[in-house]
Image (cartoon, coloured by chain):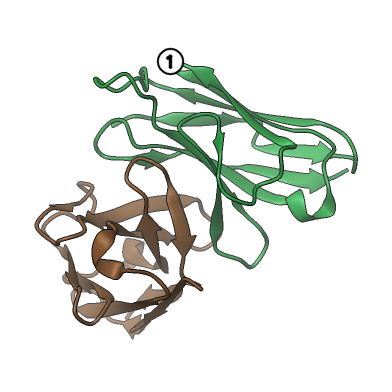
Chain colours: A brown, B green
Amino acid sequence: EVQLVESGGGLVQPGRSLKLSCAASGFTFSSFPMAWVRQAPKKGLEWVASISSGGGGTYYPDSVKGRFTISRDNAKSTLYLQMDSLRSEDTASYYCARRRTYAGFDYWGQGVMVTVSS
Amino acid sequence: DVVLTQTPVAQPVTLGDQASISCRSSQSLVHSNGNTYLEWYLQKPGQSPQLLIYKVSNRFSGVPDRFIGSGSGSDFTLKISRVEPEDLGVYYCFQATHDPPTFGGGTKLELK
């Protein structure tokens, strides 16, 4: 059974950093691109970052480029999101998701909440 | 960035009825390779999103055939025939043709 379990969320002050993790199991992690998608409270979904299966390609929207870094450790089947210079508008639930190349985010984690507030 | 506009924002339905959700793109979603990368997701209350449809009309494994995706270019539709209680929630379209990938604003399917 495919499982994605996020961790590392919490309350953080503006300007500080936080690192999220997503532990994957039930599939060959190194074979799939992965992504992070967030959802601000009572709002819609926003794609945050993607990474290729080998980790050599990373992609971000302008809203987080230069502040967020996606990475992966295929030996540990774990996806990461390093979030620096956090802003109040980064407050959201963060989901990790498995990406089938051009065929959808087929599995999602349960999400982890990040609150940026002083 | 590509803007996906979903209408209606809320769709009141009676169980057993058909529902239809529109997703219009600010530009064509036909990729240079000829494919159209338009997906549909459902987020049930309190749950993570789940994949329903990819490449406009392909149902993901286990998705009932009452979910039908259609459309082309910049105009897409998700039809749900015979709405059941487990179909209630917020539906999102998503495009992966152009960078950055973007989601629509969502359509809430709710009981009348």
Q: Residues within 10 Å of mark 1 (few under 14, many from 20)?
A: some
Nearer to the camera, A100 or A95:
A100
| Quadrant holding the N terminus of chain B | top left
Check disc 1 and report its element: helix, strand or loop.
Answer: loop
| Quadrant holding the C terminus of chain B | top right
Residue at 35% from the left image edge and 40% from the top image edge: A102
Residue A72 in percent (x, y) is at 19, 71
| Figure check: B71 above or below B80 | above
Residue at 20% from the left image edge and 51% from the top image edge: A60
Residue A19 in percent (x, y) is at 24, 79
Residue at 19% from the left image edge and 78% from the top image edge: A17
Q: What chain is tagged by disc 1? A: B
Residue B81 in percent (x, y) is at 79, 33
Residue A100 in percent (x, y) is at 37, 50
| Figure check: A86 above or below A76 | above
In the image, taking residue B81 as reference, residue A96 lies left or right, namely left
Residue at 21% from the left image edge and 59% from the top image edge: A53
Q: As shown in the figure, which amino acid type bears the numbered disc 1?
A: Gly
Nearer to the camera, B11 or A87:
B11
| Figure check: B44 above or below A23 | above
Q: Which residue is mark 1?
A: B73
Q: Quadrant of residue A115?
A: bottom left
Total numbered badges shown on the rendered structure: 1
Nearer to the camera, A69 or B96:
B96
| Figure check: B60 above or below A91 | above
